[in-house]
Image: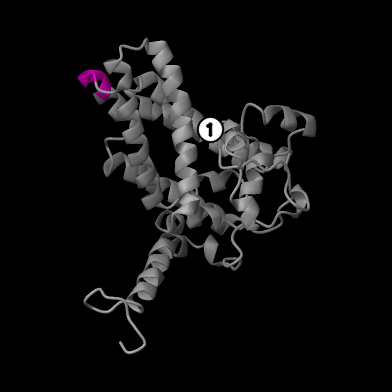
Amino acid sequence: MEDGAIRLGIFAGAFLVFALLEIFIPRRSESQERTQRWSTNLILSALNTLMLRFALPFAAVSTAYWAQTEGFGLSYWLGINTVIAGVFSFFILDLAVWAMHVASHKIPFLWHMHKVHHTDPRFDVTTALRFHPMEIALSMLWKVGVVAFLGAPVLSVVIFEVVLNAAAMFNHANIKLPEKADRFLRWMIVTPDMHRIHHSTRPSETDSNYGFNFPWWDRMFATYVQDPKGGQEKITFGLHEFQGKEPRQLGWSLLLPFKALAHLQGWVSSRVNKDGTPKTDDS
């Protein structure tokens, strides 16, 4: 069985487990009808899977195979032991994903795409699947570059991709862990209570807790927030400017980045002449 089928099977199994846990041990009771929102998030996930399969066949695992065949990357150039290279690559890939996530909040062009993820008005396992295809493509290109540079072993990349997907569903799940267990686990992994803060409408909380697998990067770079203002039960999810019904719609979610970019282009055009010089009061 090829690694893609294995990863798909693990993905489906993890999704089912966390979806069931949301029923039996929910962190917050959600009375809102979720059919449309779940449909949008699941279709976005399906589109992203198809896009990676056919438009970007040179994904992270394929790149690792290529690096192995060509002897390309740090681990091969330096003759590093495969096990050591694999462990090192796993942690550096996680740091790279964390850095890309931070950049997605700080760079306007990336934020316009990442907004789609943050406009989800609720927070559950399907939120982990809610990404715009353009963001998924750019994220994969970033990972491809890191994998190639490291010469990451194939097995470490496969394990990383599986763990990343499972961890994202876990820390987006609407499940309640015992408080003591959550506090303990936060030193090793990103828990749902920790990442839920990141989906708050409060800018100071949105710009925190960026990690997916490990919490260390947030602690190390001072982006860690222990508790939300008002407590977990009072977090308002999404973005202040998008609290209507639109974020539940598939078409709206797919067009959101283009609307934002068109608005930015219009703003620039209103301040620049056709020859590229800045407009003045007399222009």
Q: Would residue 3 be seen by someone viewing this image from the given angle? A: yes
Principal secondary structure, stretch drawn in magenta: helix
Spot occupied by residue 164 in the image (x, y as percentages of width and height): 49, 32
Q: Is residue 62 magenta?
A: no
Query: Residue sitting at 61 percent across and 65 percent down?
Result: 240
Tally the marks.
1
Screen quadrant of the N terminus: top left
Q: Amino acid at mark 1?
A: Ala
Screen quadrant of the C terminus: bottom left
Residue nearest the viewer, comparing 245 with 80 = 80
Under circle 1, the secondary element is helix
Query: Residue sitting at 53 percent across and 62 percent down?
Result: 247
Give left or right: position of 55 versus 128: left
Q: Which residues are magenta?
A: 67-71
Give left or right: position of 262 versus 205: left
Residue nearest the viewer, comparing 264 with 28 = 264
Q: Quadrant of residue 63?
A: top left
